[in-house]
Image (cartoon, grey):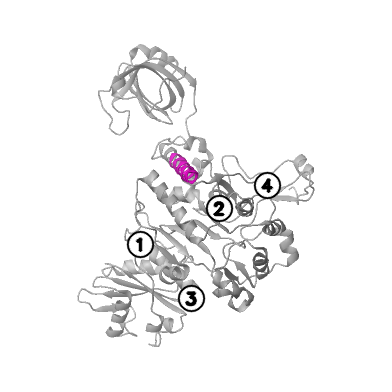
């Protein structure tokens, strides 16, 4: 028997009990002829005491870090209690031990404050996974997964698996493609989501479907993206938008209760897309703090200040309590907005003094009365600092949004232990792709327009006015889920394809299976998908989803542990009848 107990379960009540433990050696501490060893497994750490009776064996078979050992002995009270671990009241007096497997010295220390960099830890991920912090992240992910399944099961949802080898229908991110050996020069695609399959399941009568599913997108990466990621994918029949929002708001409340012990007695706030863009500059507002964007365009134009006069839009935020910022701090903020990622030419500021007076960096163009109007519009009080950016509409709104978030960070207003969920609704159905000179679906081509806007689809000049029956759930400035009410009638779906510039022949080739299914009694339906990785990262207080994925890819989409992707041998290429263009040998 390798173990009678785990390394995390022994307590003082079991003193005198004979036990057998197995695990990894965390540390070895020698005090003369006595040795203390911290033994670790998935469940915790137990201190072992090797007395002088085992010294000869230890001399012949010394222990090292990360050795896998089995020990037998008796539980005893510790003389020096460790209050930082649950097993800190006890130790095991070892009577015999066996080295099950020796270990090389790890390339980094396997503890919370490790000395290993990201790339090194990813290369030796199987060692990184032994660290307590990583283990806690994966445990949180499992608990979120379990809570999700428990909730959806209680609401009558059925988990149904859908295929991974599907047809490529590029309408968004790039597909990963898989060559078919048995069908020469033909390819499968890995699914970006199970979208069409879950709609077909609604046609089939499975009116409450869900799946915790891997999805794949061949796109540029960042902290919250991976080439493969996990969705909580859901669909319901005979529902309207309100049904979806209420059901999945309940699900998130249940997850918060189970994982964080937090209650949300009130309904989540809702905000239209237009209001989100107007007051926050983006469609995923962080509402943990206020500091809304204020449009000063009409107020500041016509006073001889060229930057404002030539700008499409002038936007301000009120940084509460920051009037005492030094010139060095203001220069630093100015440099920040000038960075290529933000792209502004400069930053205007105005201080509201303790006496209510307003002084700005453009006093030459604006008198005291005009500057006080800025303060009134931004609700700036004595001691506040007004920050202003100006330029082209889209660029300036994005810059003001980023400046707001940066100031929120600097002022400590974005507490990771505070959670503020928000529904964003009434998204545009279309957006115009300048490079392609055509309208594209903002969400996906199966999203239904608002019923009152369906008639506008016959008028190309009014596409910008059409709102979608779509919604996102935003948490602390991050989109964690999104969905829509779907089109379920063939004529409207064909009209949508045509609006996207798709000919009837192309629509039939790509989506004939779905159009055909709509002719056999498709019910009204809609759904939502949550990013499991992002949700776990937010609940765990992390900025990157990689911390919550057992074997993630790096920022280049590579698995540095496996060294993947990699070349395949000539025989495989020949079987697939793929002729690669290779660089000539030197």
Residue at image mark 4: 165
Q: Earlier in the sequence, mark 4 or mark 1?
A: 4
Q: Residues within 10 Å of mark 2 (few under 14, many from 20)?
A: many
Do labels 2 and 3 touch, CB within 8 Å?
no
* Residue at 42 percent of width and 13 percent of height: 57
Residue at image mark 3: 393
Count the numbered circles shown. 4
The span from disc 2 to disc 3 (Cα, nearest Å) is: 37 Å
The span from disc 1 to disc 2 (Cα, nearest Å) is: 36 Å
User: Is disc 3 placed on a helix, strand or loop?
Assistant: helix
What range of the chain is rendered magenta? 138-154
Residue at image mark 1: 408
User: Is disc 1 placed on a helix, strand or loop?
Assistant: helix
Q: Residues within 10 Å of mark 4 (few under 14, many from 20)?
A: some
Front label number (4 vs 1): 4
* Residue at 26 percent of width and 27 percent of height: 81
Front label number (3 vs 4): 4
Residue at image mark 2: 235
Q: Earlier in the sequence, mark 4 or mark 2?
A: 4
Q: Earlier in the sequence, mark 3 or mark 4?
A: 4
Magenta stretch, main secondary structure, is helix
Q: Is residue 13 left or right of residue 355?
A: right
Residue 149 counted in the magenta span:
yes
Residue 115 makes an appearance in the image: no
Task: Give the x, y percent position of residue 355.
Answer: 19, 76
User: Is disc 2 placed on a helix, strand or loop?
Assistant: strand
* Residue at 40 percent of width and 22 percent of height: 5
Task: Give the x, y percent position of residue 231.
Answer: 54, 49
Front label number (2 vs 3): 2
Residue 247's tag is: none
Q: Earlier in the sequence, mark 2 or mark 3?
A: 2
């Amino acid at each position: 028997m390798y173990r009678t107990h785990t390394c995390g379960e022994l307590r003082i009540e079991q003193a005198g009990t004979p036990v057998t433990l197995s695990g990894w050696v965390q540390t070895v501490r020698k005090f003369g002829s006595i040795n203390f060893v911290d033994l670790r497994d998935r469940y915790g750490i137990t201190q072992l005491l090797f007395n002088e009776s085992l010294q000869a064996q230890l001399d012949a078979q010394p222990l090292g870090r990360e050795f896998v050992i089995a020990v037998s002995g008796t539980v005893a009270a510790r003389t020096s209690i460790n209050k930082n671990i649950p097993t800190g009241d006890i130790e095991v007096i070892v009577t015999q031990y066996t080295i099950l497997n020796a270990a090389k010295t790890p390339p980094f220390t396997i503890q919370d404050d490790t000395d290993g960099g990201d790339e090194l830890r990813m290369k030796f991920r199987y060692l990184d996974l032994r660290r307590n912090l990583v283990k806690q992240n994966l445990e949180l992910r499992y608990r979120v997964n379990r809570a999700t399944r428990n909730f959806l099961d209680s609401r009558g949802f059925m988990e149904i698996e859908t295929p991974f080898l599907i047809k490529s229908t590029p309408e968004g991110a790039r597909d990963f493609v898989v060559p078919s050996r048995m069908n020469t020069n033909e390819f499968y695609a890995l699914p970006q989501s199970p979208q069409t399959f879950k709609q077909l399941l609604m046609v089939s009568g499975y009116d409450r479907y869900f799946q915790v599913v891997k999805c794949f997108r061949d796109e540029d990466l960042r902290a919250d993206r991976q080439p493969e990621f996990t969705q909580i994918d859901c669909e319901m029949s005979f529902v309207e938008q309100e049904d979806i929002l209420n059901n999945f708001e309940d699900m998130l409340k249940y997850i918060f209760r189970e994982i964080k012990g937090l209650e949300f007695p009130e309904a989540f706030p809702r905000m239209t897309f237009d209001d989100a863009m107007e007051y926050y500059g983006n469609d995923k507002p962080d509402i943990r703090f206020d500091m809304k964007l204020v449009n000063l365009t009409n107020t500041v134009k016509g006073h001889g200040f060229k930057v404002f006069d030539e700008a499409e839009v002038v936007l301000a935020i009120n940084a509460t309590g920051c009037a005492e910022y030094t010139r060095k701090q203001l220069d630093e903020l100015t440099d920040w907005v000038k960075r290529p990622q933000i792209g502004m030419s400069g930053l205007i500021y105005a201080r509201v003094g303790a006496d209510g007076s307003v002084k700005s960096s453009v006093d030459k163009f604006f008198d005291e009365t005009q500057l006080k109007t800025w303060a009134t519009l931004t609700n700036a009080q004595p001691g506040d600092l007004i920050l202003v950016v100006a330029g082209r509409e889209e660029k300036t709104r994005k810059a003001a949004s980023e400046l707001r978030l940066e100031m929120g960070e600097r002022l400590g207003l974005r507490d990771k232990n505070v959670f503020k969920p928000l529904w964003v609704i009434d998204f545009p159905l279309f957006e115009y792709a300048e490079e392609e000179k055509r309208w594209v679906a903002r969400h996906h081509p199966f999203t239904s327009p608002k019923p009152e806007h369906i008639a506008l689809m016959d008028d190309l000049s009014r596409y910008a006015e059409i709102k979608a029956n779509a919604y996102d759930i935003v948490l602390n400035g991050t989109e964690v889920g999104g969905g829509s009410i779907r089109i379920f009638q063939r004529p409207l779906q064909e009209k949508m394809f045509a609006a996207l510039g798709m000919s009837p022949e192309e629509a039939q080739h790509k989506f004939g299976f779905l159009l055909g299914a709509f002719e056999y009694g498709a019910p009204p339906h809609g759904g939502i998908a949550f990013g499991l990785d992002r949700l776990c990262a937010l609940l765990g207080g992390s900025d990157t989803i990689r911390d919550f994925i057992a074997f993630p890819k790096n920022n280049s989409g590579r698995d540095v542990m496996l060294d993947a992707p990699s070349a395949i041998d000539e025989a495989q290429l020949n079987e697939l009848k793929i002729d690669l263009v290779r660089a000539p040998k030197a």
